[in-house]
Image (cartoon, rainbow, N blue to C red):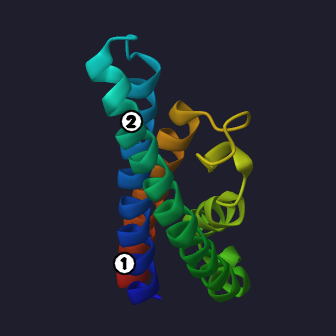
């Protein structure tokens, strides 16, 4: 269980880094002026965004699988501690479009960022509970 939580924390960090990079590059692309230099730079930004989205699409399902495994392990123990229930909730909701940058109409960076932060904190508290058991 501890190893699984550590793997999830690592994957959360990777997914957050990819999301940050994609958001930054999209912001840069949207703010380009129509100068000749920017027109030459635009294809590079678009390529970088596509590449980052591809990596995101490869990483996110791994995170979802780890979360699914965590739910399977924690669900029978949910009654042991309220933190287990919270962690199960985060793990169950990780696949929401609200958290997937590749769903631009649904994705909300602030909600994603808050979820990552709360998820990591919940993992930290859960690991403390596990240490006491």
| Location of mark 1 (residue) | 6
Tag 2 secondary structure: helix
The quarter holding residue 66 reads bottom right
Give coordinates of residue 22: x percent, y percent. 44, 43
Q: Is residue 129 visible?
A: no
Give coordinates of residue 32: x percent, y percent. 38, 17
Q: Is residue 40 visible?
A: yes
Give coordinates of residue 54: x percent, y percent. 52, 62
Give coordinates of residue 53: x percent, y percent. 52, 55
Residue positioned 62% across, 72% down in the render: 64
Residue positioned 59% across, 70% down in the render: 84
User: Up-down: is 33 above or below 20?
Assistant: above
| Location of mark 2 (residue) | 25
Query: Viewer-proximal residue, 25 or 93?
Result: 25
Lower sequence index among marks 2 and 1: 1
Query: Viewer-proximal residue, 26 or 81?
Result: 26
Residue positioned 57% across, 36% down in the render: 111
């Amino acid at each position: 269980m501890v190893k699984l939580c550590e793997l999830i924390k690592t994957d959360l960090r990777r997914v957050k880094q990819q999301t940050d990079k994609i958001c930054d590059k999209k912001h840069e692309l949207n703010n380009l002026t129509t100068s000749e230099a920017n027109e030459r730079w635009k294809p590079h930004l678009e390529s970088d965004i596509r590449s980052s989205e591809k990596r995101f699409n490869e990483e996110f399902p791994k995170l979802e699988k780890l979360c699914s495994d965590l739910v399977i392990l924690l669900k029978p123990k949910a009654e042991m501690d309220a933190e287990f229930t919270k962690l199960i909730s985060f793990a169950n909701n990780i696949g929401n479009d609200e958290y997937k940058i590749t769903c631009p109409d649904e994705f909300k960076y602030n909600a994603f960022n808050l979820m990552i932060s709360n998820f990591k904190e919940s993992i930290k508290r859960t690991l403390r509970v596990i240490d006491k058991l």
